[in-house]
Amino acid sequence: MSKEIIIRGRDKNVDIALLEDSKLLEYVSSENNIDFAVGDIYLAKIKKVIPSLNAVFVDLGYEHAAFLHYNDLGPNFQSLKTVLKNIIAGKNIPKFTQIELLPEIDKEGVVSDLLHIGDPILVQVAKEPISTKGPKLCSEISLAGRNVILLPFSNKISISQKIESGDEKNRLRKITKSFIPNNYGAIIRTAASGCDVSVLEKEISELVAKWEKILAKIREVRNKTPYLVQREVDRVSSLLRDVYNPSYSDIIVDDKSLFEEVKAYISSIAPEYEKTVRLYSAGPPIYEQYGVEKQIKSSFGKTVPVKSGAYLIIEKTEALHVIDVNSGNRTKADKNQESNAIEVNIASAIEIARQIRLRDLGGIVIVDFIDMKENDNKVKLYETMKEAMADDRAKHNILPLSKFGLMQITRQRVRPELKINTNETCPTCKGTGVISPSINFVQEVECELAYIRENTEHKKINVRVHPFIASHLKKGLISIELRWKFKYGLGVNVVPSNENTYLEYKFTTNDHEEIIY
């Protein structure tokens, strides 16, 4: 399996595509000047206390106040609050490792006992602004590295559940305890499995130094709120930090400055793989060259093709996402309804897992699969979905099919859903309407031809299309029309028709009768 990361720079935007065997699995599009990013740390003040929600609103300079719930204060909030109060008051405090941590706060406590309007507070962005909601915050500060997440005001060490080996967990816990300073805890990430002691020690030292710089910065700007004390690394480095591993054979970048940045980052975490970073300088745009643009156009619309005519309908409501699985009335005569249903459902489950990750869908996702009667098939579908989503980094939970044939999925929402408008302006009405992306036209017609060949007796087929489209399909020595003839063993003939609108097509016999299928 070949795995590639394709990075495109354009103006203030950076687009990152993760490919496996040339198939788009993850796509991130972000602005370099984004206001809030997950991981940003702010020195701020309490704007409003809401006892009924057991939460407070915090002013970060955003249009909508940020939200901080009592449960997100962190168990060691009293220690953080005391240190922050002393720094802002200008008092001399001992070294961080010498501070005596205060008792943990009550899990069932109320926020009004700890915070009041105007109180200074150190917060970290946990979720970016979504719709009309401001950012969601936490006060349990964490500093993420590639292998370790450092937790100031803690003495606990946790190991990623995805590291299955008990011996490896014990090794990582033992070596981390041997050199992590007092008053620091850590979460050992999955990427740390098999890591050398020197690598972990160096990373923890760098994260400790970062925290000490944050404390120094707070002392410097203690009278300025809200103030961005620490910005999370840019999204390129952030994504690479979370997803990169040596299995990626190539990281290809089309922008010189981004190339230098990515190369420097890979060199710092895995110098032996620095050569996998390449600067793209060929003629065609990088996303066209690697087939990313076409996959974006076909993957982000309301309707997503699966195979053999089946398709998904993906809708978003205020409360949840709904995905409907449709067979498209494509059934094989040699199979019964149950066999067709499980075949379409299995293929759809794999595509749904890809779509959830690709669009970064969060919250509640309801999937309406095609009804099945056999319990074995229902279990098989459930296991397929779990396996397909196993590589998703976001926390998620999948429930078996309900008695109504619905599957419920919850997935951690951190950033807004990625939305890409794939519709194009209609050339006929000059912009008063839209059409589906034209880049998918050939694939769509091909899919229909494949179905006609398998399910009808027709051997000679006329494809009636707009003259402009006809010229494209007939262009070249080995035209698309000719390739269709060889591929499907049909007498395919592309016929220009002024009666057809742009991207409209009809299949007819030589007697000009429309083929019904």
Image (cartoon, rainbow, N blue to C red):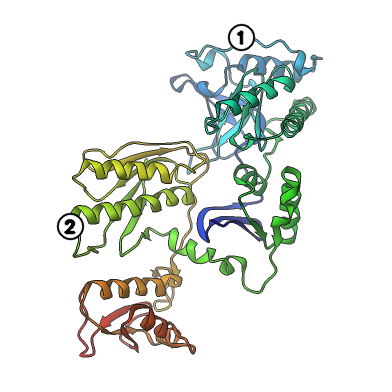
Residue located 26% across and 51% down the image? 342
Residue located 32% across and 46% down the image? 367
- Quarter in which the N terminus is drawn: bottom right
Tell me if mark 1 has few (under 14), some (14-19) or many (20+) residues whose alpha carbon lies within 10 angstroms of its own. few
- Report the Cα–Cα distance between label 2 and label 1: 65 Å
Residue 441 appears in the rendering? yes
Mark 1, secondary structure of its residue:
loop
Location of mark 1 (residue): 103
494 vs 300, nearest the viewer = 494
Tell me if mark 2 has few (under 14), some (14-19) or many (20+) residues whose alpha carbon lies within 10 angstroms of its own. few
510 vs 105, nearest the viewer = 510
Mark 2, secondary structure of its residue:
loop
Location of mark 2 (residue): 336
Position above or below: 470 against 47: below
Q: Earlier in the sequence, mark 2 or mark 1?
A: 1
Q: Position of residue 168 (x, y in %)?
A: 60, 28
Q: Is residue 451 left or right of residue 248?
A: left
Q: Position of residue 181 (x, y in %)?
A: 74, 20
Q: Is residue 126 left or right of residue 375?
A: right
Point out the residue furthest to the front here: 167
Q: Nearer the viewer, mark 2 or mark 1?
A: 2
457 vs 311, nearest the viewer = 457
In which image quadrant can residue 458 be found?
bottom left
Residue 325 appears in the rendering? no
Q: Position of residue 434 (x, y in %)?
A: 40, 69
